[in-house]
Amino acid sequence: MKLEICKGIIIIKGLDWYEFHEVVLKFMDKKINFKTYAKNYNIEISNIGINKIKSLLKTI
């Protein structure tokens, strides 16, 4: 799993099918807005801090 930051947008890359769905469910539970790319299992997040994302991803 790799975090990439571009112009205030955090992109989570390198997820497999299982990790992708776990992250999506976790973000839905925490009511975080995100966009998904099912083609390559990337997730794009805006309007939230990198430290918050890192702490959520540690629990997975």
Image (tube, grey):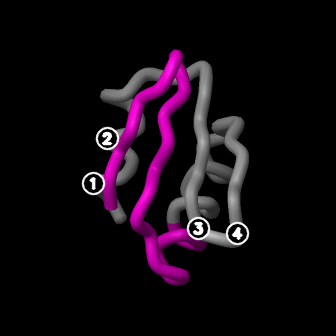
Q: Which mark is residue 31?
A: none
Horizontal side, residue 13 vs residue 34: left or right: left
* Quadrant in the picture for the N terminus: bottom left
As drawn, 23 above or below 17: above
Q: Measure how far apart labels 3 and 2 are at the Cα level.
A: 18 Å
Q: Which residue is mark 4?
A: 38
Query: Do the numbered discs 3 and 4 sit on residues whose CB atoms are within 8 Å?
Result: yes
Residue 23: percent from the left, percent from the top? Answer: 52, 61
Tell me if mark 3 has few (under 14), some (14-19) or many (20+) residues whose alpha carbon lies within 10 angstroms of its own. some
- Whether residue 57 is situated above or below residue 34 in the rendered picture: below
Q: Which residue is mark 1?
A: 58
Neighbor class of circle 2 (other Cα within 10 Å; few <14, some 14-19, many 20+) is few
Q: Which residue is mark 3?
A: 41
Does 9 appear in magenta?
yes
Q: Which residue is identified by label 2?
A: 54
Earlier sequence position, callout 1 versus callout 3: 3
Say what secondary structure mark 2 lies in: helix
Separation of residues labelled 1 and 3 (CA atoms): 18 Å
Q: Residue 53 placed where, x, y %?
A: 41, 38
Q: Disc 3 or 2, which lies upstream in sequence?
A: 3
The picture quadrant where one finds residue 31 is top right
Is the residue 49 above or below the residue 37 in the image? above
Disc 4 packing (10 Å; few <14; some 14–19; many ≥20): few
Whole-percent x and y of residue 51? 31, 28
Tell me if 31 is positioned left or right of 48 in this view: right
Could you tell me how far apart the alpha carbons at marks 4 and 1 are, in whole angstroms? 22 Å
For badge 4, the amino acid type reads Ala
**Which region of the structure is painted magenta?**
1-22
Q: Identify the residue at horizontal 59%, vertical 36% (top origin).
A: 45
* Residue name at image x 60 percent, y 20 percent: 47
Q: Are marks 1 and 3 in contact (CB under 8 Å)?
A: no
Mark 4 lies on a secondary structure that is loop
